[in-house]
Amino acid sequence: MDIQERRQRHRGKDKHYKRIILVGNPNVGKSVIFGLLTGKYVTVSNYPGTTVEITHGNIALNGKRYLLTDTPGVNSLIPMSEDEKVTRDILLKERPSLLVQVADSKSLKRTLLLTLQIAETGLPMILDLNMEDEARDKGMIINIQKLREILGIEIVTTIAPQKKGIKELKNSMLMPSKPLTELRYTPLIEGYIEKISLLLPEAHLSRRSLALMILSGDESLREWLFGNLSPEVIREIEGFRDECQSKTNEAVSSVINRKRIEFADEIAKQVIQNIVPEGGWLFPFIGRFSMHPVWGIPLFLLVLFGLYEFVGVFGAGTLVAFFEKTIFGNYINPMATKVVNLLVPLDIFREMLVGQYGLITVAVTYAIAIIFPITVTFFIAFAILEDTGYLPRLAIMSNRVFNLMGLNGKAVLPMILGLGCGTMAVMTARILETRRDRIIITFLLALAIPCSAQIGVVLGMLSALSFKATIIWAGTISLTLLVSGFLASKIVKGERTDFFLEIPPIRKPDAMNIIIKTVGRVEWYLKEAVPLFLLGTFILFLLHKLDLLVLLEKAASPVVVNLLGLPAKTTESFILGFLRRDYGAAGLFAMAEKGLLTPVQSLVSLVTITLFIPCLANVFMIVKERGVKMALGMVAIVFPLAFLEGGALNWLLTVFHVRL
């Protein structure tokens, strides 16, 4: 039986399991909770008719198997984006036996806004207050027993990264209950809720919750209504909706939402106790300081300087020198060459393993001796920035700049994620509400956002130049990002949307969290990147043996040599850039170390490779998310733009005799 057949059979079995649905606001640790509950085996598939991925996994409770579904994060059951519509449709069209709301403990008011909407659906549920440690660090203690009495449901607390509370969460999933609390609206709205409810069919969600969605102007329900009611009944329902709106000066949706906010605020006041935050005044002060429009800038520059010193100087300098020259140069490569020459009989295979483009002497050396130390130090630094809570503040600091490009402020999040992995960032562009924003952010990610592995190599080369070179590189990339984003916002049609972002408290980074995140990303690097290093080197070997590499170098010579002012050999790095950006950058790094590039050539090559076409996996993700036509269009813009900017920079640095 092949893999596809096993998957189909597994999905067939899933249909017979009772369903448990995870819901919650974005960025509350829902996916981490899902992973802890299900273990390793999961299936990921697009929800029918969308590009939104839904994750399923099996969970055993008291000897019985259930199908656990992780849904996209939502702020409301009245959809404002495709992700939110998918989550609402799952609740509407599936038949869950239990709904688990995963929540952020330190944002209880926002949590309760969603809890009240879920309560109106009539579905059995439990509430998991995750990130309890962060709430405590912020000076918040929640009276769980009192909140349990008010809502009438089981409530547990968890700290997902530490796996705390997971056993209690599983036990509570055996005791679901329907919420007892019921929010009453104005007499006018209650009257029309009753009138509309009488016309609605039986559904998995209560008629009351559906009536409230209709009165709130939820147009996304029309498809479901047309599938279950006659056109005459639908017109009658819409007539009641319009009649209710005509009897009030304020939008009915605003009245409903304000009532929910007031009720959530009232509950929060009853159950939240404020204490002196752990860590005293220092962390809250740093948190406010980091988002100040003036004083936040020096802190931002200090963070960049620390990143440069740790990754660029220590990682790319000290560690790379030790691994490349001592470990590989003195021991591994000489030993591998002797063993291969002794055991491998044919010259062509010996050359393939330890020759000029050898899989051991080049691919493994690049991947482990050069890129690995830089990547690890960057992963550590990135994990520290995540764990301290600084990354969302970086988003706030840069929000005004992104607004100049006509983007929703949420676009900052895919940008930040793109510094880790561009492929993942393209997928997370789904959090943006409009197609316009998703197209623009995907284009900018492809053009000017280097991934973590590439940043590490770039910092390594820049550390060997000067701070002036770093400023020129960063300034060129930033200017390209701003101008390209501004022009794209004028060309791509569509509406702009508002920006909302939850800010976690600044906290002391947890060593175990940093280790877990770093190990996970290093594992990704070893599994995903290293094989491509081997593949890229093997392709180079074949091109070399077939004398095609010389032909490619000659064909690219007018651009690489005449326009960019680089040696013809750098063509190899740009060819490898098609497979992986960081591998192309690694080739440039090796050339610079050998003295084959002047400081000006190093800077020009870095700008060009940074703006170059993203890695192959990223291109495939763009095709998947935006379509073949859109992906080809982006490649057609990015490819010549990278070389034109590199050529312009080479001309400016040469004409003005800039010393680096």
Image (tube, rainbow, N blue to C red):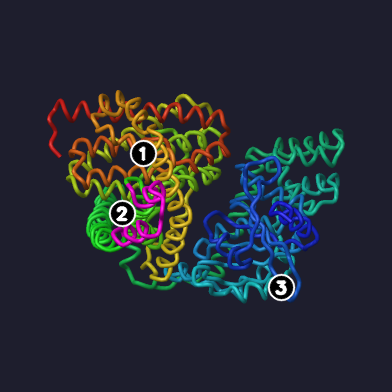
**Residue beneath label 3, please?**
61
**Residue beneath label 2, please?**
370
Q: Quadrant of residue 313?
A: bottom left
- Are there few (<14), some (14-19), or many (20+) residues within 10 Å of tag 3? few
For the residues labelled 2 and 3, the Cα–Cα distance comes to: 48 Å
**Between residues 502 and 256, which one lies in front from this camera angle?**
502
Say what amino acid the circle numbered 3 marks: Leu
Seen in the picture, residue 516 relative to 458 is either above or below; the reply is below
Residue with the most extreme front position: 345
Give left or right: position of 594 versus 394.
left
Give the residue drawn at x 16%, y 28%.
654
Give left or right: position of 115 versus 303.
right
**Between residues 413 and 513, which one lies in front from this camera angle?**
513
- The picture places residue 172, in percent across and down from the top left corner, at 67, 73
Question: Along the polypeptide, which appears first: circle 3 or circle 1?
Answer: 3
- The picture places residue 610, in percent across and down from the top left corner, at 34, 39
Question: Along the polypeptide, which appears first: circle 2 or circle 3?
Answer: 3
Give left or right: position of 470 versus 246.
left
Give the residue drawn at x 46%, y 62%.
520
Bounds of the magenta segment: 333-355
**Residue beneath label 1, please?**
401
Seen in the picture, residue 518 relative to 355 is either above or below; the reply is below
